[in-house]
Image (cartoon, rainbow, N blue to C red):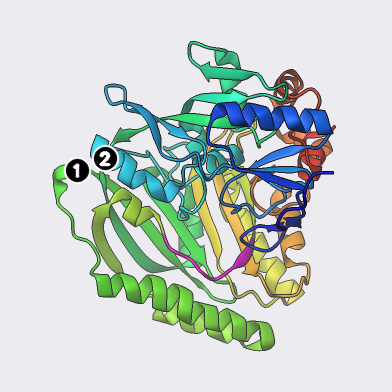
Amino acid sequence: MLPVTARWSNWARTESSQPELEIAPRSVEQIVLAVQRARETGHPLKPIGASHSFTGIGATDGIRLDMSRMRGLVSADTARGRVTLWGGTHLWELPAILGPLGLALPNMGDIDRQTITGATQTGTHGTGVGLRGLSAGVVGAQIVTGSGEVLTIDEDHHPEMLPAIALGLGALGVLVTVTLQCVPRYLLRAEEAPEALERVLDDYVERTRAVDHFEFYWFPHTRGTRTKVNTRLPWDHGREPLTRLARFADEELANNVAFGGCVALGRVLPGITPRVNRVIEQLSSRRSYVDVSHRVYVTHRRVRFRELEYSVPLEAVPEAVRELRTMIEKRRYRVSFPIEVRSAAADELLLSTAHGRDSGYIAVHEYWRDPDRGYLRDAEAILAGYEGRPHWGKMHTRSAATLRDRYPAFDRFRETRDRLDPDRIFANPYLTRVLGE
């Protein structure tokens, strides 16, 4: 028997598991030994990063591979704007690594707690219909396969596997290193403003295509949204950042303390949620600032929630949001968290939610302590009906049978999995559900 280790749970507390052994490797050789041990004992093996996925994609009752000791910069090719990172490196660590090299990520989401492998393997994206998700920036990787073989994957070595490896769901092997295509560092001008929901939906596609980054948040039970437009600026443009007090007031007091109190109260007294949302809508104000890209992209959130997010064809976003609004009203749900809408450019990664199409992303949230009243399931049924593809790291109920129809390259990915992990060393119940046996 393997020794019992600490129980694992993810950030949202939606998933947990009891691994029998935890290994924290410091080298590729130790990862190989861990895979060999998994094969010898018959236990599955799962690498784990920051545990920020809402699904059980990282859960295992076998061997948990803690990648936290393999972090930081491996090498840099500044002439080509590329960096190679250890797989356990967190997104929040990247500014200190990339900044001195004069580089930055082309795009980011609004959370930076994930590891680079966790973010890319689940298809994390930011917003901007002219920009692809983080996984599309993976131009190379070193991976330990299910047989314990160490492979280099890049444009010169097994390039045919890169579209699978870059967004592999952790099903193909342990990513030891990841090589990213970066861009010269830049600034962003952020312009945030309250706007009417119907106006935003009427102009959504045109407006999304007209700017670098566009997103909006809509609190159910209200008629208004909060929009955010980010415009890319050269590094020498000059910063006009938020003051420390303004950032603290917005991110900590408003987004965490005050909002956390509101959703906690709404859990006890759900009937007041519509009125609370309307107060939040009325307090929404305009602001504009210019800062380093990562300081504009990222928001620090401490209020836990559950999240479901689907990619739909860009043109379908307005109708899908309107149908969500109708469903909420008809079912009389009391929804305290906003619906978030973003976009991303088409790419050719085999399991990318933006594979072959410019995509809109609609994210639906609920407070982690709220009882399950069916809101996320009803939202999923609507979004799936618009040729929806679920975010691999967010809650959903889709299975291989339904996902195969949504991904033209689904079987090509399964072929790569059969090649790299034929014995399913890296399998778990989530992967079996979404990929099949």
Mark 2 or mark 1, earlier in chain: 2
Is residue 300 shown in magenta? yes
Q: Which amino acid does label 1 sit on?
A: Trp
Task: Give the magenta-colored segment's residue range.
Answer: 299-306
Q: Residues within 10 Å of mark 1 (few under 14, many from 20)?
A: some
Q: Are marks 2 and 1 in contact (CB under 8 Å)?
A: yes
Q: Residue at x 70, y 30 (%)?
A: 35
Residue, x 48% and y 66% (percent of image)?
301
Of 387 and 161, the residue lying toward us: 161
On the question of residue 207 being in view, the answer is no
Q: Give the secondary structure at mark 2.
A: loop
The reply, left or right, for residue 174 in relation to residue 188 is: right
Quickly name the residue at label 1.
235
Q: Is 187 within the magenta?
A: no
Where's residue 354, x and y in %?
A: 57, 36
Q: Residue 191's quadrant in the figure?
A: bottom left
Q: Is residue 138 visible?
A: yes
Q: Distance between the residues labelled 2 and 1?
A: 6 Å
Helix, strand or loop: magenta stretch: loop
Residue 2, x across and y down, in percent: 80, 44
Of residues 79 and 354, which is closer to you in this image? 79
> Toward the viewer: 399 or 37?
37
> In the image, what residue type sits under mark 2?
Arg
Vertical placement of 227 versus 159: above or below? below
Compared with residue 161, is residue 358 higher up or lower down, i.e. above or below? Answer: below
Mark drawn on residue 185: 2
Quarter of the picture holding the C terminus = top right
Q: Which residue is drawn at 51% across and 82% down?
A: 278
